[in-house]
Amino acid sequence: MMPQTMTIKENPAKQGRMANLELLRCVAMMMVIVLHYLGKGGLLADLTRENLGGGEMAAWLLESFCIVAVNVYMFISGYFLSMSSFKLSRLIQLWLQVWVYSVGFGLAGALSGVLTGVDFDAHYILTLIFPISMGHYWFMTAYVFLYLLFPFLGMAVQRMTRQQLQAAVGLLLFTFCILKSVLPVRLELDGQGYDCLWYICVFMAAAYVRRFGVPVLQKKGAGAVMYAGCCLLAFGGTFLLRYLYLRTGSLGRMIQMCLDYNHVLPFLASVGLFGLFSNIHVRGTWAGIISRVAPYTLGIYLLHENLGIRYAWQKWLGADKAAEAMSQGGILAAGRMAAWTAFAVVCVFVCGILVDVVRKWLFGILHKGLLHVGAYKGLVAGIEKTDEYFRVKGNA
């Protein structure tokens, strides 16, 4: 048996949910909201402009510190999934959750007149009905495809030696992360981290950390330095590319390259943030609250990124006022932008949690009622049998 050293000392099988990583999951989702508020709220100034004010610079700095969010969320998933078994029940529940949000809020947004930014046409309807295949939520499309590959990836990871896993992770990161980070061109097949291939890379990296650990991540303060340093470098690299563009007129397509999800700086920053939270101890009442809230965070994403309201909620929560404040310039502009952003994050986070609590409650009632139907009961039994099959085979 190969030794399996975990970055986190607590045994998840004995401790249940790890409150520190569940807290990180919540923080990552808050960062996602920040990214969508800044980007879709029109608060990120065009980097090809000559002059940027203090508030506009602050918005890009905040973007640089939050760009790790999606990588962090997937890293946490990979950390836990890599040592667990494939569950057909989990895949079906996930698909149903996405479908209900897609259709429910997509139609509600269109029929209520809230819908902006997209047309209510046949393509829109198809996107609501087939959210995974039509890419309604790009992250969920990538995640579901990754989970479909999990029976192969998970079993491979659990059987690979340290050297084999190091080589596999190294090759993946070189191909899909390092190469694009050093070349002064946009590669034709570079998905910028918006695809399943990149999240296979993140999954494998998280699997390595879970099985064998990374000593530097266990050192107190190292994760914080790694996170902050890489985020600042990503911000500096972005404005260096902007400077070169303004002086030469070249590299226009690459100005935001350092803020791509699959760039080495956001990736290392996400690993650093994971290491930072790995060494945080959350106990008592707060641990219980966080562990109860964290499972509902996916609902926050499915709600505020639904096509029906995707380009509307930012205005409801003051994005236009934040933009007006930023146009005035000065330090106060940055403060007002940050205040409006924080207000939006709290509102969306709380609303998303409450909506998903209701969704899960309704799912529970429906499930209990359908268990009295013979066909449904037989289907559930078949799914449970499939889960058991993969569990046995995965641990053989």
Image (cartoon, helix red, strand yellow):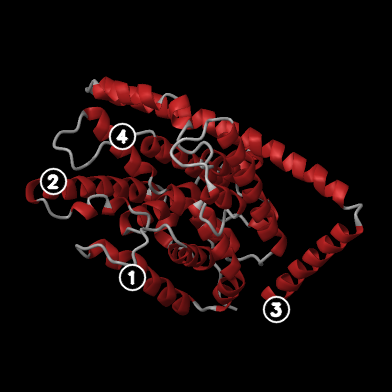
Please state which amino acid type lies under the numbered disc 1: Phe
Please state which amino acid type lies under the numbered disc 4: Ala
Across and down, in percent, residue 260 comes to 33, 54
> Cα distance, mark 3 to mark 2?
57 Å
Q: Mark 3 points at which residue?
A: 396
Q: Residue at x 15, y 33 (%)?
A: 51
Q: Residue 27: tell me if it is visible.
A: yes
Across and down, in percent, residue 167 comes to 41, 77
Of labels 1 and 2, earlier in sequence is 1
Q: Which label sits in the foreground, 1 or 2?
A: 2
Q: Residue at x 21, y 63 (%)?
A: 185
Q: Which label sits in the foreground, 1 or 3?
A: 1
Please state which amino acid type lies under the numbered disc 2: Tyr
Please state which amino acid type lies under the numbered disc 3: Ala
Q: Which residue is drawn at 67% across and 74% down?
A: 394
Q: Name the residue under label 1.
A: 174
Q: Which label sits in the foreground, 3 or 2?
A: 2
Q: Name the residue under label 4.
A: 59
Q: Name the residue under label 2.
A: 243
State the SS at label 1: helix
* Left or right: 291 in relation to 179: right
- Residue 390 is tagged as none
Of labels 2 and 4, earlier in sequence is 4
**Residues tagged 3 and 4 counted as in contact (Cβ below 8 A):** no
Of labels 1 and 4, earlier in sequence is 4
Of labels 1 and 3, earlier in sequence is 1
Q: Which label sits in the foreground, 1 or 4?
A: 4
Q: Residues within 10 Å of mark 2 (few under 14, many from 20)?
A: some
